[in-house]
Image (cartoon, grey):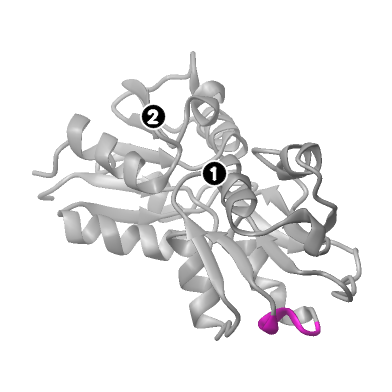
């Protein structure tokens, strides 16, 4: 089969956007999220007095329709899947975006709005890569948290993925989080799936830590923790054929 096969382990909904970008670059993407999203039991909070909403992932944005008045408030989110999700939901308030990670998003908030204008609501999952609260509270902001969802490891890889790995039709696996990388490495080991021919590429050094010492051809990580840098790293190290 012509071309390089790339396994996408990213949690939905961002996986579809990643797959489209890979196809445009000349790769053959195969989608198999290794984490699944489930809502928590936390009730949607009131937005009374809140001046803006921060959503550090597309999954967080998916829960905004549950908040009365969310569409009228400024939204701070990352470019890419998060912005795409907000647009698909018809968010009509002012949207502030940046490329990067949670730290970059917190910096954007600091640049755009004042802590004197009211509290912020941060919508996120139970497991976070960067504590936005910490940075903003240190700068004088009041931040309310809504842990709207949590991710759970899937119990096995899909049949198509297993077949593609066994037949060496997958040459690269991409990882967007340390939890996803950890579960993938565990499933490969548990299901006795060969991965010695696979180059593992993570969105950050932290995302790659669970892969160190695992049976991969190479483990590489992006220089900047965002998807653009991740795909550039892929293109530089494993150019499409």
Along the line of sight, the residue nearer the viewer: 105 or 89: 105
Counting residues from the N terminus, which is met first, the one under dot 2 or under dot 1? 1
Q: Which mark is residue 182?
A: none
Instruction: Decide if residue 16 is on the left or right side of residue 239.
Output: right
Q: Position of residue 233 (x, y in %)?
A: 28, 34
Residue at 71% in and 49% down? 152
The stretch drawn in magenta includes residue 69 = yes
Residue at 53% in and 62% down? 12
Look at the image and tell me whether residue 81 can be seen.
Answer: yes
Instruction: Decide if residue 185 is on the left or right side of residue 233.
Output: right
Q: Image quadrant for the C terminus?
A: top left
Q: Which residue is mark 1?
A: 104
Query: Please, what secondary structure does the residue beneath circle 1 have?
Result: helix
Compared to residue 11, the image places residue 202 above or below, namely: above
Q: Position of residue 48 (x, y in %)?
A: 89, 76
Instruction: Decide if residue 191 is on the left or right side of residue 50.
Output: left
Instruction: Decide if residue 226 is on the left or right side of residue 1.
Output: right
Quarter-of-image position of residue 31? bottom left
**Which residue sits furthest top?**
213
Q: Which residues are magenta?
A: 68-72
For mark 1, does the 10 Å Cα neighbourhood hold few (<14), some (14 to 19), or many (20 or more) residues?
Answer: some
Quarter-of-image position of residue 136? top right
In the rendered picture of this protein, how many numbered marks are placed on residues? 2
Q: Nearer the viewer, mark 2 or mark 1?
A: 1
């Amino acid at each position: 089969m012509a071309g390089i096969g790339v396994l996408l382990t990213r949690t939905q909904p961002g996986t579809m956007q990643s797959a489209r970008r890979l196809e445009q670059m000349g790769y053959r993407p195969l989608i198999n999220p290794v984490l699944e999203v489930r809502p928590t039991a936390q009730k949607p909070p009131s937005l009374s007095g809140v001046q803006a909403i921060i959503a550090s992932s597309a999954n967080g944005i998916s829960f905004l329709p549950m908040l009365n008045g969310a569409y009228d408030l400024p939204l701070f989110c990352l470019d890419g899947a998060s912005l795409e999700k907000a647009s698909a939901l018809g968010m009509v308030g002012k949207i502030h975006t940046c490329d990067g990670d949670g730290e970059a998003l917190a910096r954007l908030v600091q640049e755009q709005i004042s802590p004197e204008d009211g509290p912020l609501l941060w919508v996120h999952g139970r497991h976070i890569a960067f504590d936005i609260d910490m940075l903003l509270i240190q700068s004088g902001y009041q931040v309310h948290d809504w842990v709207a969802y949590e991710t759970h490891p899937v119990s096995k890889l899909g049949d198509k993925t297993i077949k593609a790995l066994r037949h060496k039709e997958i040459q690269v696996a991409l990882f967007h989080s340390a939890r996803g990388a950890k579960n993938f490495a565990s499933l490969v080991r548990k299901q006795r799936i060969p991965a010695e021919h696979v180059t593992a590429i993570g969105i950050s050094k932290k995302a790659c830590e669970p892969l160190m010492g695992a049976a991969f051809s190479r483990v590489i990580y992006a220089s900047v923790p965002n998807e653009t840098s991740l795909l550039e790293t892929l293109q530089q190290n494993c150019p499409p054929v």
